[in-house]
Every structure is written in C-alpha cells, then in structure tokens.
Image (cartoon, rainbow, N blue to C red):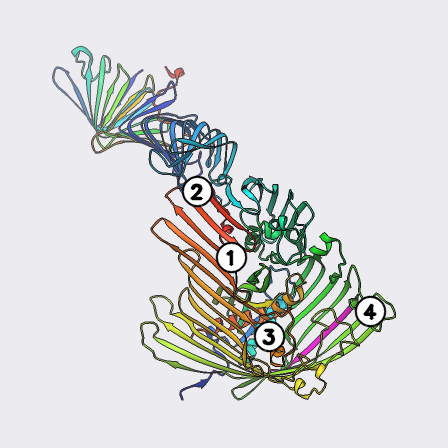
Amino acid sequence: APTPGKAPVNITADSLAHDAAKGVYIAEGNVLVTDGSVTLHADHVTYHIQEGTAEAEGNVRLSSDEEQVTADTVTYAMESQEGTITNGTVFIKSRNLWIRGATLEKRGENRYTAEKVSITTCDGEDPDWSITGRKLDITIEGYGTAHHVMLKTAGLPVIYTPYLLFPVKIKRQTGLLAPLVGYSSRKGLDIIQPLFVTMGDSMDATVYTNYMTERGLREGVEFRYMASALSRGIFSVEGLDDQKIDDGTSANSDYGYDGSPDRTNTDRYWFRGKADQELGGGFKAKLDIDWVSDQDYLREFKDGPGGFDATQDEMEEFMGRTLDDYTDTVRTNKLSVTKTTNAFTASLSGIWNDDVVARSQDTEDSTLQQLPTLTMTQSRTALGTTPFQVSVTGGATSFYREDLTDALYDGERTYVLPKIYMPFKVGAFSVDPSAGVKGLWWDIDTQDSADALSGTHSAAVPEFSTDISTEFYRIFNTDADWADKARHRIKPTLTYDWQDRLEESEYPRFDSIDEIDGKNQITLKLDSILTSKKNGEGLPVYRDLLTGTISQTYDIQEEQESDPTKWRNGLTQEPFRPFYAELIFNPAMNLSFKFDGTWSWYESEMLTQNTSLIMGTEETRLFSISHRKKRDPLESIHESLNITPSTSYESTNSLVARFKTDLFDRITLDCDYERDIEENEDIKKSVGVTYTSSCWSLFTRYEDSTDDTKIVFGVELTGLGGFDSSYDAN
Amino acid sequence: CGYQFTGRGTLPGGVSGLCVAVPENRSADVRLGPMVASAVVSEAISAGADAAVGCTGRSGSLTGEIRTVSTSTITRNSDGDSTEERVTITASFRLADEDGAVIWQRASVTGTETYSVTPGSDSTSSRNAALDEAAEDLAENVWAGLTQRF
Amino acid sequence: GEVGISADHLTSDSQGRYALFSGNVRITRDGAVLKADSVQLHYEDGKQKGDTTKGLSLIEAEGNVTMDFEEKRATADKAMYDLRKEEVTLTGGPPRVVSGKSTLTGKTIVINRLTGAIKVDSGNSTRVKVRLVPGEKGFSFTPDKKDK
C-alpha cells in the first residue's frame, strides 16, 4: 500500500470551495477522501492542506484493510494516520470485534485508545454480551488493555475486573477473559485464571492463578522467547502451598493416588523448560529441564491452562519435543551441544534422570546418570568409489549413581563400533551384508571394591548381519470409481543376524550398548502394499489402501543352548519366536483400521493383539476406538506348567474410545471412555457438551476417572480469548 | 501370474541413485538424525536402489527435518498409571534432482513405536530402544512414500 | 493591472459596442496569460470604446481556453474573466486546473484572483475531483502582494 504522507490524496465531492486565507478545501455532498490505504466518506469534509488533515462530519465512515469506523465526526491526519472519532464504532474485521465509544482516538495504523468504551464480538445492535471499560488501549496485531471492566450479558453486569488484557489477533487461544471454573472431589471449587503479558513481538509471558477451595492458591508463570528461527525457548515455573497431604490414611485418599507413594510435602512446585540456542560455527545447544516436587503433582494439575497437557502441547508445537509423560516418576534433564557436518554428528551431553520419588521421599537414589557423555556417529557413507560403505558409532560416558548398591555400580565406559557394508545385487535380489566389531572399555567403581566387576575391563564383540530381499509387483486396471489403477507390491526379506555373547557376570552392563546377550537368528519378513491410483484434474491421487506385514524369527542360539538357565524365559526352550502380523486398512481419507498381533507357537495363544479404528478428524466429527491386549508370556507358561502364579505379571487388556460429533447445528458432544478390562474397572468416563453461539460458546464437562471426579464449566467469548485448546485433547 | 520384479526401484523423476542428508533434528535425542539417515539408506538398498548418506553426485538428493518427537501414554492400568507409551517421530522430506528442482515432497511423515513401561521405574532405556525402532519405521514410511507413484 | 491583448483578427461593430478577437488570441493580466480561439470584450455601463482596454468589465473567451499563472494551468471550453471582481469562471470540457501533479476538475470552476478562493461545482455527470500531492503549492492564481 502507498506510504501515508507521501501518497497523493484524492478528494471527490458534489462541490468544493478553496479558502486560501485558512488554507483549507471545504468539500460538500457525498465526499470521499482517500490516500490509497485509508478511505474517508462523509457528507462534509474540511481538508487542511498544510497539515494534510481532514475533518469529516455527517455519516462518516473511515475504512482500511484491517478496520471499518462509522462515526458522527472524524478528524484524520493522512500522514500520521492519527485521528479522533466521536460517537464512533470501530469494527476490527479479523476478529469480528466491535468497539463503541463516545470519543475514540486512532493512534497510528493499528492502534486505538478510548476514554469510555464498550467492546463485543457479537454483531447487531444489542449484543449477547459486551464489555464496558475505561482507558482502552488496543493494538490490532497484538493485545488490548482496559481498566474498570464490566462484562455484561443481556445488559446485566456479570463480572467485574479492575484490569483486563486480551489478545486481539494472536492465534494463541488462551485468553484472560474466560476463567475455567470447576468442582471436584480433589480440589473443591477450582478456578483457573490465565493472564497474558506481552513484551515486544518476540517475547511473551502467561501468568496463571488457580484458586482451589480445598487446596489453596497455585500460581505459575510461563515465559516464551524467540531470538531467531533456531534460537528459542520456553521456561515455566509454578508452585502451591498445598493445604492437604496424602499420608496414606483413608481421610486423605482424595489427595493422593493409589499405587503411588505417600505425598507428605506441602510445598509443591514444578519447574520445566526447553531451549535451543545457535552457538555459531555449526554448534547447537539444547536444554531440557523437568524438576517437579513430587510424583503426584503432574497428575493433580494435568488439565486446563497451565496444566501438564497444555505444557506438552506447547512444547511439541513450539520446541518440537515433549516432556516425559505425566506418570513417569523418573524425569529427564539434559543439556547437549551438538555439531553436525555432512554425515558426521558429534555431541557432548550431560543427562540427569531425576528420580522424583527418591528425591521427595529422601530415599536411596541409584538412578543411572550420564555426566557427561560424548557420542559420535558417522552414518553409512560410501568408501571412496569402492562398492563398500562404512559407518562408525562410538562414545565415551562417565556414569554416576548417587547411591551404589551391591548390584548397581557406576564408572566410565568407552565404545566404538565400526561397521562395513558391501551391498550388491544378484539378479533381482539385493544383498546388504554388514560386519563390525564393537570395542568396549570399562573402568568400574563398585560399592565393594573386592567385587569382581570393579576395575577395568575390555572386550571386542564381532557382529555380522545380512539382508537378502527382492520386490515384485503387478498393476491391475481396476477402472472402478475408487481407482483407475491399483498396484500390488510384495517384498520378502530374509535377514540373518549373528553377534558374539558377553557373559553378564564377567562384563559390566549399563544400557543397550553393552547389554550383549549374543544373537544367532534368521528372520523371514513379508511386506505387501496395495496402492490405488485415481486420476483427477490435477496430479493423480495415490492411496495405500492395504498395507500388511508378517514376520517370523528362528532363534538358532536358543536351539543350540542346552543350559535351561540361558533359555530366553529360563523355563522352556522356544527357538521359534512368536509370529508377528500387522494389517493397516485405509480405504478413504480419515478412515483407517489397524490390527497387529503376535502368536506364541508354544503356548498356541495370542501374546499381543491390538486393534484400532479411526473415523473422522479432531476438527469435525470423530469416532475412534482402540483395544490393546497383552498376555505376559511368563503368566501363560506358569499356567501351562502350573507353577504358582505371581502377582507381578505385566498382562494388560484395555479399551480406549473417543466420540465427538455435532448434534444440532450449535451443540457438539465430546465423550471419552477408558476401561481396564484386565481388572474389570473403568479408568475414565467423561462427557462434554459445548454450545456455540455466533460470538460466544459455553461448555460443560463431567469426568469420572480413577484420578478425580469433577464437573467443569466455562465460557469462551469468541475472538477475545477462551480456553487453552489443550483442555479436551488429553 | 503377471507379477514382475521391481529391479532398481521406482524413485520419482527417473532418479536412480540417492544421496541422503542427515536431517535437521529438533528433538533432544542427538543420535536420531544420523540414525534416520542410515535407516533410509538401508531401506533404499534393500529395495535395489543405490544410496548412501552425505554423498554427492548421485541423481537424487533427499533432505529433511525431524520436526517433532513426542511420547504419550496409550494404555493405563486401573490406578491410572501408564503401562504402554508410544513415541512418534514426525518429519518432513524433499527429494531434489541434480539441478535442485524438488520432484517429491512430504510435509508430514511419521514413524512410531509402542513400548511397555512399568509404573514407578525408569523407562528411559526402553524409550531409547523404541526410538531406534521408530526411526526404522519412519524410514520405511519415507521409502513407501518415495516409491508410491506408478 | 493592465490588460494586454493580441490576436490574428479584430472585428468590431461600427459604434465599437463590442470587440471580437479571433485566431490565437492571447491576453495577459497580472501575470496570468489567457489564450483562446476567440475572445469577446465587454465594457462597463455601455461605454463602447472598441479596441481600447479602458473601462473593460468582462473578457469572454471561448474555444481551447487555457490560463497559465506561474506553473499552474487551467483549461476549459469557455472562460469568463470578470475584471472588476477579478473572478474567472471556467466551464465546459470539463474545466481542469493542473499544478505540478495536483489536479482539480468539476462542472464549473470559479477562481477569485484577489482572495485566492476557488469554488468548484459538480453537474449530474461530472463530480468535483481533486488530487493533492503533498508538498505541492496548490491551485492559487493570486499574484503576490508586491506585484500590485
């Protein structure tokens, strides 16, 4: 658009008089004044030539891309784009926001102030709700602030707040205006009030206050900054002086969770943050912090603005990575500096896995920490022009445990795994053999220095593996309405894996790198994909209708092993590993059915079977149901050998369903159901109803879960702010 | 029976050889970038194509970013503790020909793996193992996308 | 101020009641130059002095009328220059005034060279249109005080 003040001003009118003495043009009758970006309509306009200001009276309309003003009188300065409006209404198109005031000042391109004002996003003369306030200051691209604010619905004052700040155009949904009000057996009356503060365009902060009649006041602040595309961060801290504790007594059972240790501390807090920082020279630093006062905190404050879910969504969207899940009691804190060139990556990291229970209960903490660890990885690159490819992974780690035990030790470990590949083709078959030797050096500190594992060890573990695969396909001319053509591809793959074995008693084991049980197995896998092709106007549309995989492994090492204690389950010899099958059926957009399962040949029963059906999308209508069943192999073996069953089997059988639809044109129903079929108990039942009107929406939600039983309701004034979208996506 | 062997693989735009760059990595796991690159190369080689990481001079170059890595509970026991979690890697990939013109792109390809967790214990090692599997799943989906056209 | 007139032809009636100049008529008055295809002079209270300029009350110019003053130019089909009121009324064409890149047009334009006032009226088809470019001097045809 032309730059104000430089652009020529065009005036059209029925008549015009130039008064040279006053240096003004007086235009009468359907007058239009425009400089290309702003247009002023009025019955009568006095235009001051020197100052470049227009005084308009009578049916005045001032409009630009962003807003539309109607008023009795407007004085407007073309260059500074400033002006005063009397008895005016400012309409902000992007947010459908109406601002009415006796006198309003237009301050520059996107900003308005007003002494006494009423704001609403409802159209029409008597809006369903409006906010009256004083000293309004609103920026179209950013935020609005006002004092002595009264929310009125149908003319009745409902809520008063001395100060109000609301997002005008910012996408982020959380807004001040709508408090989240709920009642639950855990918290009593529970009101969460987020408040936005913005500090320039690349930093903002959100403050939360959450008052609970049973528990007290929880407050938190989240700070977000973006220095550049690659350097950004989010840091949040919140805390509460909890009036209740969980000391295991039935009276306090509402303030803890079954199966989790007692929680007797009252000063509860959660500090978490993630940051990426560009260090120059190709070095990048990444920080992840997650420090919570006790193991129940994240479950207790999981929903609503400032809760765990909101943080998790925010972290994923803004930082691309999430925190450990809310029920994980060992939480990762990590700082790493990484450098990546062509195919080589090196990074130095310090990792502290904070065992929340050990720290809060002040008990033994033998969690394995890596302070620091250096990892280097060279991906599969060609070795000059030879047919060989080579890859190297390696690392040096200083392990540390706060409390050593007779079985748990720490110390240093260095390892390197060079691998060489020689891919070649035989007819239609592709063969990809690779061989490598993993060199390991340890220097172990044990609790008791006489322990055999104490001191230095080294080992060289050769490994070899090869893939032999081929692929064949056929194209069918279906000429059906769902596809003009279809292609069916079948890809069999034979894999042989061999790796030497390290005796667990002779060599230290920290993680998967040095947990080397040896391997000698053959796996046959069959992949099959049916793809449809539909010619449309533009490019043809392809869809993988049916994708299937079956795989079977034969364990030669198990077969040759005579010592029962070395068998995989220590009881029976089972060289044939469970048979695996997976099927994904995706006949149309937003409609998918998935099944996967494993079958035990020896117990002749399904060890795992998972099915899921998803119809629709989160935005429109959605029906999704997922059933997951796992049978602990030990449990079935114990049964068949009638050994006395122990309670710690890891068999699970659960159902999760979600149903969301709009009933009439304004009401949406959103139900969740989660059941532990193994224990025959419901984990969570919830139903939410949302009524959406043109400029506001009201919603209520009843939730009964093992964690809490609660009823929540809230109002969202569309365009001005509402709930953090995380509330329903848990 | 009408089936024929795929031979050198059906990459778009007549690309025969593939250079895979280590994808940008926004996740906290520093190994993920090189691991995904190697997995895509192994997938390409097992389909008969000729591929390597970080090379130049082949007729197609594959670049991408790992946009998000998220873990979420998918199964809970009656106490509400999670017993199964799923790690999901979401990435975007582009295939460019010799003179840099983009001939294929996918804004969102995912790789997932579920793993079981025992409530109250440290699940970091099983999460890392699951991440390796998810990277291989991602590579399979990238390759399936690359060779989808016919 | 003086009025200078030049033209290709001059015709007047035998009693000098009016004078009609035609063909490249050029009239100068207080720094302004008026050109037209033909110009008719009118005299005060009927004194008809033929070609003299004394007692001149009204200059009626018609056909490709242009009036230039400093860098401003007005164009119209017809111009009536009332010398007593120092007021030029431009009609037809429609009349336009150009000063630098600023332009002014309408059905009739009345320019008062004493007060500098300009009045523009629109007709049913032609509306008043003004284009003001910031920094330009505007449409005044008034000579500065010192010339008087």
Q: Quadrant of residue A613?
A: bottom left
Q: Callout 4: 10 Å neighbours few (<14), some, many (20+)?
A: some
Marks 1 and 4, Cα distance to the nearest angstrom?
A: 49 Å
Q: Chain of mark 4?
A: A
Q: Are marks 2 and 4 on the same chain?
A: yes
Determine whether the residue tagged by mark 1 lies in a helix, strand or loop. Answer: strand
Q: Residue at x 68, y 78 (%)?
A: A419
Classify 10 Å Cα crowding around label 3: few (below 14), some (14-19), many (20 and above).
many
Which numbered disc, 2 or 4, marks the residue that appears first in the sequence?
4
Please rate how many residues cluster around mark 2, counting C-alpha atoms within 10 Å: few if below 14, some from 14 to 19, many from 20. many
Residue on which the image places disc 4: A443
Residue A86 location in percent, x, y? 39, 25
Q: What residue does disc 3 label?
A: B52
Q: Residues in magenta?
A: A413-423
What secondary structure is marked by label 4?
strand
Q: CA distance from mark 3 to mark 1?
A: 49 Å
> Residue A18: horizontal and vertical position, in percent?
33, 23
Circles 2 and 3: CB atoms closer than 8 Å: no
Apparent side of residue B149 relative to residue A379 in the rendered image (left or right): left
Question: What numbered label is drawn on residue C37?
Answer: none
Q: Give the residue type that dot 1 points to.
A: Lys
Q: Is residue A650 left or right of residue A478?
A: right
Alpha-carbon span between mark 2 and mark 3: 51 Å
A309 vs A542, nearest the viewer: A309
Residue located beneath label 1 in the image: A684
SS of the residue under disc 3: strand
Callout 4, which amino acid?
A: Asp
Distance from the alpha carbon under mark 2 to that under mark 4: 62 Å
**Are labels 3 and 1 on one chain?**
no
Residue denoted by label 2: A719
